[in-house]
Amino acid sequence: MAKYVMFQGTASNVGKSILTTALCRIYFQEGLKVTPFKAQNMSNNSFVTANGLEMGRAQVAQAEAANIAPNVLMNPVLLKPTGNATSQVIINGKPVGIMSAAEYHTSYANTAFEAAKIAMKKLSDDFDVMVIEGAGSPAEVNLKANDIVNMRVAKHLNAPVILVADIDRGGCLASIVGTLELLDEDERNLVKGVVINKFRGDVKLFLPAVEFLENKTGKPVLGILPHIEKLGIDDEDSVSLDEKFSSSGEINIAVIRLNKVSNFTDFESLAGEPDVNLFYAKDAAELETADLIILPGSKNTSEDLIWLKENNFVAQILKKPVIGICGGFQMLGRKLFDPAKTESSHVELNGLNLLPLETTFSENKFTKQVTVDADFEFLSSHIKAENLDGYEIHSGVTNLDGKKFVTAENVLGTYIHGIFDNDNFRRQILNAIRRKKNLPPLEVTRNFRAEKQKNYERLAKIVRENLNMELLNKIIFD
């Protein structure tokens, strides 16, 4: 039977995912069988497992840190926002329907929690340690009755809870005290400590605040973690895009920040290239300096295509080299058909007409891992690479005639997420842009997947150095 520890936060994006990732690597380093778990994820950043099931991207990173294969048991409930306060509900890796927030919370949450309980039991039986992540805040009183990801999980497992707060955003002390005050007594008793995250400056100057917190709450402060630049670890949701930046290189790559952008982790490997300046464009004017425009995945391709047209992005897209991934790929075609109105109220839309393709949406969803070869022309360069791996997640059927890459002059489209994680392919695409700019091509110098492992090691080291691991271990194992 596994031992448990759960990270809950005073708000979203305070560092729960990162701390969960860090502990997964730390306990893996110590020879324990460790697994991440998050009962319910709300994110359009998802991944497809080896058996074709869909799960949240954050738990994939945590599984990598634990040196185990991603499994939907780690994230049995995934909510993918579709717009208008609705989400696609995915249980155990498969979609069960689109529901409004009210419908899900009042009618379906208990059913979803049954799936979470089964997953918890299976993981508990198979692992030594389960590192559990909450969502948002456990003190949202309006959502608490039907919350299946925070204190309901902690109480079900009798798991010790560590409360995480982000000092970088301000109001840290008040958020900790206020969160604890709003919890019920039995929930407050489960909280065994507090972690202050994203600290900048001299820790010694903060020690009086630590003393105040411990006296006020009766909870020990287990650590003050520094703000870590360039973590290089996949993010859970698009809130983090506001903090994205890359080196100021010779190639400017603009990823259009669609309203329903999904799987933006596709571009982490590009951002790490020394000759690349990658940025997320919210306004069409930002595309002026781009050498390449990327249309990313979208949870609602039809609505995001309309948004592009209404916000003057099309003129820029038409005069620049462009790559479309998944939903962005669908937009590059001639037509999008939606006879059952699964994506929007539009039965038919004109695409950007940059590729000779048509897509028809349906309620069916295609999820699979793929390994492919690339052999095509792009920007007057020949791109050829073998055994490229990635994954597909899409609704809609496109007339591809078996092709995995479709090109036309300065345009490239594919359904494959994660394609840029392949080092040789990524460098060939970048060198094609370099040649177009009369810059010399560069050799492959990076191993992106090896870098990710180094980033997990770096994170674990920083957390070990700044967290009271002796006290934490006592909380978990005694």
Image (cartoon, rainbow, N blue to C red):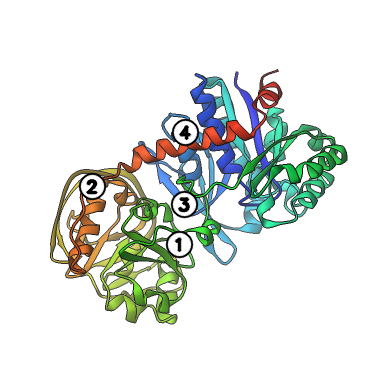
Secondary element under disc 2, as helix, strand or loop, is loop
Tags 1 and 4 in contact by the CB under 8 Å rule? Answer: no
Q: Amino acid at mark 2?
A: Val
Discs 1/2, front: 2
Q: Nearer the viewer, residue 451 or 68?
A: 451
Identified at 80% across, 52% down, the residue is 174
How far separated are the C-alphas under marks 4 and 3?
A: 23 Å
256 to 14, vertically: above or below: below
How far separated are the C-alphas under marks 2 and 4?
A: 23 Å
Crowd tier of the residue under label 2, counting other residues whose Cα lies within 10 Å: few below 14, some 14–19, many 20 or above: few
Q: Amino acid at mark 1?
A: Val
Image quadrant where one finds the C terminus = top right
Would you name the residue on which mark 3 appears? 45
Of mark 2 and mark 3, the one earlier in the sequence is 3
Q: Amino acid at mark 3?
A: Asn
Crowd tier of the residue under label 1, counting other residues whose Cα lies within 10 Å: few below 14, some 14–19, many 20 or above: many
Would you name the residue on which mark 4 appears? 457
Secondary element under disc 1, as helix, strand or loop, is strand
